Structures are given as C-alpha cells and as structure tokens.
Image (cartoon, coloured by chain):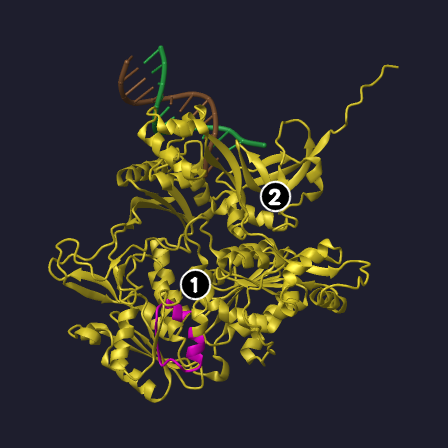
Chain colours: A yellow, B green, C brown
Amino acid sequence: MTPVKQKPIRPHRPIVSVAVALPVMDCYSYTVPDHLLALIRTGKRVLVPFGSRTVTGYLIGSSSEPDSTTLKHILDVLDDAPLFSSAMVPFFQWIATYYMYPLGQVISTALPAGLNLTDIAVMTLCPPGMAALTSDAVSPLEKTVLTALTKRPMDFRQLKKDVGQRVPWALIHQMRQRGWLVVERQIKGGQVRRKTIRMVRLAEGVAESGKISPQRQAILDLLRQQGGLSVPDLSKRVPTAASLVRAMQKAGMVRIEDHPVYRDPFGDPIDPDRPPVLTDEQAEAVNRMTPLLGKGFRTVLLAGVTGSGKTEVYLQLARQAVDRGLHVLVLVPEIALISQTERRFRARFGETVAVLHSGLSRGERYDQWLRVARGEAGIAIGARSCIFAPFETVGLIIVDEEHDAAYKQDGGLSYNARDLAVVRARHQNALAVLGSATPSVQSWHNVAIGKYSTVGLTRRVNRQPLPVIQTVDLSQIRDERGIRRYITPLLQQEIQKTLDDGHQTLIFLNRRGFSVFPICAHCGQPLRCKNCDISLTLHKQANAYRCHYCGFSRPATSTCPACGSDKIKLLGTGTEKIQEAMVQLFPQARVARMDRDTMTRKGSVVKLLKDLKNRNIDILVGTQMVAKGHDFPGITLVGVVCADLTLNFPDFRAGERTFQLLAQVAGRAGRGKQPGKVILQTFNPDHFSITAAKHQDFVTFFNQEIGFRQALGYPPFTRMIAVRLSGRDPRQTGIHARALGSACQDLLHPEGPFHRQVQVMGPIEAPLARIANQHRWQMLIKSPDTARLHRFVNQLMLGPNALPTRRDVRVTIDVDPFSLM
DNA sequence: CCTGTTTGCACG
DNA sequence: GTGCAAACAGGG
C-alpha cells in the first residue's frame, strides 16, 4: 500500500466580493482568514489591501470558489452588525449603473459620513535629514520640506499646506532613499463610533466589609436598590462617584461595563397626539391607498391643494402600514420642513420613528442609522439621503412635496431622491406615494400615460376657501422711484389693512441680500466676484459684498475696483432691502426675515416659527424658504414682490418652477379662520405659469407646458444627461471639452446605433462660465430612448475609445440634470 | 544616451 | 485615489 500524503483538504474556500470606497468601476474578490470567518456578513465594512494601500470596502456578497487564483486576504471586519441588508445591494447596483457612478462610492454616499478608514502616508524626519538641513547639499525646496518636518511628522496634505506649494512625490522618494525621512502608512478616519457609557453593578458576593467611607457605602446602597447605574446617574447622587467607582472596582466591590447607547438627537419630548377625524376627501384618499399596501409595487400621486391636509393622510396611511408590519420611509424636502413633519410623526408614532437629516451631528446620524439597520425603528423620516435608510424591507415610501428641487443632489452622486423612491419601491414591492399641491410635469406625465395612479384632495380642511389672488402689472409703474418700485400702492394698502385687522403678512422675494446689483455710479462697472462670473450682492447685516456662489466677500466700504470711486449705486432688490422698506413704511409693525442668511443657526427656524405662531411677528419677509409647506394660521396676506425672477432663468424648467413657487407661496395665505388674499406683482401678468398659479391649477399649467416640452424635445419626452467639465486653466478645459464633443460626433456616425436617436448639444461654455476660479463647460446629451442614451454616454466615457482622463480637467456626469447653469 | 518628469494603467 | 512602470522630453 503506497502511503498517501495527506494534504489539508480545502477544495473550496470562502470568497467575498468587496466594493471599495474609491473611484473604481469594478468589484474585487478577497479571501477570508479563518479568524474572521464568523464575522463575515453582507453589509459590513472591511479593511482590505488595495494596490499598495489599505482602504475600506463594503461586503456586497460572498461565495465559495475553487482555490485557483491568488487572492489577497481581508485584513479586518470593521462592523459588529451590518450597516445595510443584502436586499439593498441590487438597489445600490441599480444606482451605480443608472448614474454611472462607482458602486463603492454610491455606498459611501448612502452611509453616514465619518466611519471609513484609509491609510495615508505620514513623513517623519530622520537624523540624517536633520544633519542635511545644516549642510548646503540641499535644494531650496528640500530645505523648506525638511524645515517643515522638524515641527512634526506630516501627511501630504499638511505638508502642501505648510510649504505653500505642491511637493513632487519624486522629491520625497529621493529624500527617503537618502535616509533623510521615513514614510509610514497610518490608518486614519473612523472618527464616528458607537457612544458608550460606563455601567456600574455590584460585584458578586460582595460582603459587608464593615469599615468603608460613607460615600462608598452610599454607592453600594444605591446599587443594591437599583441594580445597575451609569456613572453619570451615580454622580448625581454622589458627586465624587466617577473616581470612587474606579477604586471600588479594583477592590472588587463593583463591576464596570461599557454599554453602547444611542445619542439623543431630539430636544424636548413631544406630547403624543390622537388622530383627528378626517375630512371625507382625506378618508377617501386613505381608503383608496390602504388596500394597495403589501400588494406589490405601485406609485400613487397624491395631488392635494395647499392646506388640504396631506400630512394627515400620510400619517394615517403610515399607521395602516405599521399595523400590517410594514416599514415606512418618509421623505421631506429639507430641514426647515422636517422639524414640522418630523414632530407630527413623532407625536403620532413615538419611539418607533428614526430621523435622518443634515441637522444631526455625525454621531447622532450614525445612531439613527443603526436603529433602522437593526430593526429597532419602524418609520424613518428625513431629507433626501433618507432614501437610503437601511430597512431590510420597505412597504410604504412617502415623498412629500415631490416636485421640490431639493430632492436632487448636486455634485458627487447626483441622484434624485424622488426618482430613487420609486425605484426602491419597485425593488421592494412597495407602495410609493408622491404628494404635492403642484406635481412636477414629469410625475403628472406619468399619471397621463398610466404609469402612476392618482388620488386628489381638492378642498382645504375646515372648508377654508383658496386665497383670492390679485395681480399687479409692474410694467405700468415703471416710472416710480425708490421703495415704490417694488412695493406698489395696492400692496402697501393691503399690508396696512392686514396690520389694522391684527393679522399677519408674508412678503416673498426669491433673492436674498440687500442689493443684488451694485454698480459704480462713476464708471458704470458692476462689482464682480474675483473668482466667479457673477456680480456681488450687498449684505447690509454682514456689512459686506458677497458672492452667492463661492462665498467670496469684500467689505461694504470698498471702492470701485475699476476706477476707485466710492459712489456705488445699489441696484437690484433682495429680501434685506424689502425688510428695511417694511420697517420704514410700517414703523409700528414687528418685521422678521427668513432666508439662508438668517436661518443658518441650529434652532433658528424653530424659534422663528414659534414667534410667528405666537403672533410676535406681523410681517415676515422671506425667500423660497417660506414657500415650503409651513402652516402659518395667522397669515391672511401674501405679497409676491416680483414673480418674474425665476421665469427668466435660461432653463427649460423655468416656467414649471415659477408656477410651483407661486402656487406654493400663495397657498400660505388663509389657512386659519380668516380667508386669505394674495397680491402678485409681475411684469408678465398674462404668462400661463402665473395665471395657472392663481388657481393652483396644475392641470391647466401642465396642458400648456407639455405642448412646449413635446415641440422642443425636452423631458419628459426625452431624457437628458449633462456632461460637465471644469478646470483651472480656461484653455485646457475648452480643449478637452471640444475633444469630448468630437468624440460624441464620432459615436453619432450614420451607420451606428445612435444616429438620429441621440442628440448632442454643445459643448458650450456654461452660462456661469467661471465659479470659484473653475472654468466650466458643458454638453447636453438627450434622447427619447433612455437605454440608448445611457449606452451612448457609457461608450463615450468608459468605452474602448473613451478619451483618457486628465488630471487638470474634471469631468462629471449628471443624469437627469436639474440646473443647467 | 542618460535622467528627471509626465502620463496611463491597474488595483483582487 | 495613488503608486508604479512606461513613455516622453530635454540636456549632455
């Protein structure tokens, strides 16, 4: 018998698929060392070697494959519980494909920020480097680098900042070879972690040892009564507890354990409320949608006029879903709104609500995320990124104010949360409810072609009438000067009447600041931003001219940079100037302002809303922030200073935006017992966007607008992808843009699949050709055929003949762009 | 022909 | 995103 040499038999070994958090289009496979095997789960993060570096990756699947190729091992598992379920993986993959964005970075965008680890190169000075510094065998740049490193070890970024210029990698490499410095890889990041508190318990079998201090005795007594107590709780009774328990642990009297806790993002507790009796229409809406729960994918557009009580419909529908054991996801446009809707959901559902929005600290966000991931919350409510809330399954997704542009993310992964809501609902066989008083053209088109069904709310709750809207033709009063140019006699008169009646007024102007067009009275040059192609806005409160794109500012005392004159004429009106005019015209009134300048501080929105509710404000001046879904029962008059600002934007959606904004802001009036009135000042009183807004009549608006969209080949009849280029050097950016443009023309050749199917517009310089010293070009690609459009751009960017990427020109892809500026 | 620098590629 | 190798330009 020939002896058989026994090898350890391992024909198959566990292999995991990892998406790394880097801009790479592929996923990578790794093997799992034995000691980590038990920890492997889809949705956890892992630390992996990647090239010569160590980076964070996401486990998106595992398999067991024959031991053939040589794979690297994962180095560590970073989470004790998954951050998302495996059901999310196809959703993430869909997003990566649709938005042409690397899967790992899609997941990074979805997850709470601040968790990931990466290694960075840290340079430390060595003795020979020290010696070289004093010799004269060093170049000037080497000398500055060495000098910088004498202070402390630095990474590349710090070094660049300290030295004040780019340091070539080759130089560092050389210095390392000479032994002047060492480069080590340090793992950094992961600032956001679980918060723990120290829990103190009695140690087992602790005998009465007789002689102990009264404080120690007090602690023991407390623990005997209450079982375990946290250190902060103990300190309330015994102030020195924090240090005492340490000694007592050494003495074997108590045990101390770290317990993970959730940070509390909620300020005051909210009193529970009871569901009110629904109006017939509301009840009908709930009754029509409830049977759709748990019955597969469906999208319903809930079209309800302003003040018709959509939120109550959401609440009761969510109740039906929760009672059926379904998870609920609620999206609202932005923080100012969240406070209200969030409060109502928390009042109704209490502990089971998780909130996810940018108003939370990173740690709070992580904790809310974990509560959802671990199935401890049944409802998640938040802004656009909440669409990624890691429920294993979702039964109902509600998108409030679905038309709102805030659902579209700019920069990075440019997703639209409203669209993703429908996609996620489809993936999870859920009901998606899109609600709005002014549905987007896109969504109403989907109703028209039978993709979505619709439920309507045509009347306000308590039967308040819709406000009466009166237009004032601004072209009739062109000769007026000063305040009267923008506060017409009729508006002034109505405000006075409202004040006399003790009611509140809302004045809307979609432009913040004092003067948006400061111009030199001597030479006629407007004051421009030095980094952007845009004029500066004077902010009186901040006493400075500011750029609304890059934040550049110069003092309000500046003279004209062109001629040195100190006579600056302040043309163009913003909310600040309107506020000042209100104070002048109505000295007895209490005037407040709500825009991005006044609402930055945490809690300022809540305070303002409270003041408004308690009638501490008579006149509120604001930007579109005031148009968004707030319920101000005391407001009976709304004044729109100039309705045309959005109408004249160079964007095919300008009419749609104007209609929505005006209908929404008008809807703020007359929500209480008193009927509302709206004074709408405009240069285009007969434009259909404005006439339709008067009656909140989105169907009439849609029927007009859809004709234009069809005739001009705009969405929803075509889909668009914007390719944007930006770079510091205007010439190089232009060259690359034109190269990309001719690559498009090559793809469009008559024998190819894209001929006459895909249309390329541009490349052209962007309407705002320079922002923050970045020169910008763009190209719009559109097609009636979504799949073909995506194939086209895929070939353009990633195909075999794709242009090589350049480091000095950034190219980004924006699928379904919103802003074409 | 050698060397310092830029560019394209691949990362499991 | 970055490190590395190959291509490249520039000077001896």
Q: Would you place residue A13 above or below residue A218 in this image? A: above
Query: Does the rendering let one see residue A681?
Result: no
Name the kind of residue labelled 1 in the image. Answer: Asp
Q: Nearer the viewer, mark 1 or mark 2?
A: 2
Image mark 1: chain:
A
Q: Tell me where the magenta segment starts and ends, as one range.
A: A608-628
Image mark 2: chain:
A
What residue sits right under mark 2 in the picture? A60
Residue A12, quarter of picture: top right
Q: What is the distance, in whole Å, between disc 1 and disc 2 at their CAs?
A: 32 Å
User: In this figure, what is the number of numbered marks?
Assistant: 2
User: Does label 1 or label 2 sit earlier along the sequence?
Assistant: 2
Image location (x, y in percent) of residue A109: 50, 50
Query: Does the rendering let one see residue A145?
Result: yes
Can residue A178 be found in the magenta stretch?
Answer: no
Q: Residues within 10 Å of mark 1 (few under 14, many from 20)?
A: many
Judged left or right of residue A377, residue A702 is left
Closer to the camera in the image, A540 or A747: A540
Q: Would you place residue A763 above or below residue A123 in this image? A: below
What residue sits right under mark 1 in the picture? A404
Can residue A620 be found in the magenta stretch?
Answer: yes
Q: Would you place residue C6 above or below residue A164 in this image? A: above
Q: Residue at x 52, y 47 (%)?
A: A108
Image location (x, y in percent) of residue A426: 58, 55
Q: Quadrant of the N terminus of chain A?
A: top right
Secondary structure of the residue carrying tag 1 is: loop
Image location (x, y in percent) of residue A534: 25, 55
Secondary structure of the residue carrying tag 2 is: strand
